Amino acid sequence: MITKGLLVAALTAGALIGTSQAQDFPRTTIQLVNPYAAGGSADLLARTIAAAMADVLGKEVIVVNKPGAGTTIGASFVAHAEPDGHTLYLSTATAHAIMPLLSKVTYDGIADFAPVAMVANVPNVLVVRASLPIRSVPELVAYTKAHPDTLNFGSVGIGSQPHLAAELFKQMTGATMVHVPYTGVAPATTDLVSGQMDLGFLNAPPLLQHIESGALRALAVTTLKRADQLPNVPTLDELGLKGFDIGTWYGISAPAKTPRAVLDKLGATLATVMSMPAVRQKIVSQGSEVFYLDAKDFAAYLKLDADRMARLIATAQIKAR
């Protein structure tokens, strides 16, 4: 039988071990795994945060790109990594909430990760090609109802946030459109600008120059808050689609069994990093927006978002091809 004294001693020893782990951490280089290819908006964000973390922690923080399989290659690598805080993941809804519902993965998107902090959000923008005679969301909805399944919308893949945003839009408005999945935002944007594609609910950064030039027409933003770089473009929520909120968020997570003391030190580091004016300015300049949540709030947001995405995937009958 475990006596009260032994229990107290065990708890005290555990606390001391945790404190020691935090004091010793990091012992070596930290790798931040980015599930996307180098050069994209996620990669720029990861490298900005990694450099600032290294300055705070006094140890190198490197970005390791592990793209493929809809972000699940990188997610699986981190989920099965040594849970000591030296391997972190650039979290997305795709890896945690969406792909586990659409394909067979080797990890649990919620249980196998310890959220550290939410760091940024990239708004999606509903854009149409300039040659399309549509200048507002009501006009778009009316056009699709008068011409069912004649307009094509591009996404960056089945189950991606741009795809899910379009499916939610269809559900809330009764619009009818045909989905054309692309392998990335670059080819989707190219076809939009050239007039080969009609519309899309795509990440804002690569669209901005084409919106400014007039090659694309921005009708609405898909997040609850207007995009900082498109202050004159209304949100779908403002236009009557109440609660419409599908952006591309990014967080930092660790393997699930990482010691609490280490997670706390990582959380404190990210709180410092995300409060730095230079870091915030650089993130905004990249087309993303600072969206900081601590570990507790990030975990709650992740659970809520996962439940929301699961309902949408089920009701829209989305299946991987």
Image (cartoon, rainbow, N blue to C red):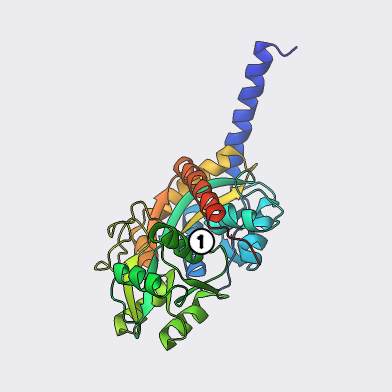
Q: Quadrant of residue 205?
A: bottom left
- Vertically, is 135 above or below 12? below
Q: Residue furthest front?
A: 146
Q: Is residue 227 above or below residue 21?
A: below
- Residue 263 in the image: x percent, y percent? 55, 43
Residue pictured at 61% horizontal, 58% vertical: 99
Residue with the most extreme right position = 1
* Residue sitting at x 72%, y 14%: 2
Looking at the picture, how far across and down is residue 293, in whole percent? Answer: 42, 47
- Point out the residue furthest to the left here: 232
Relative depth, front residue between 272 and 181: 181
Find residue 216 and report its image quarter.
bottom left
Question: Is 215 located above or below residue 221 in the figure?
Answer: below
Mark 1 sits on what residue? Answer: 50
The image quadrant where one finds the C terminus is: bottom right
Identify the image quadrant of the N terminus: top right
Q: Residue at x 58, y 72 (%)?
A: 37
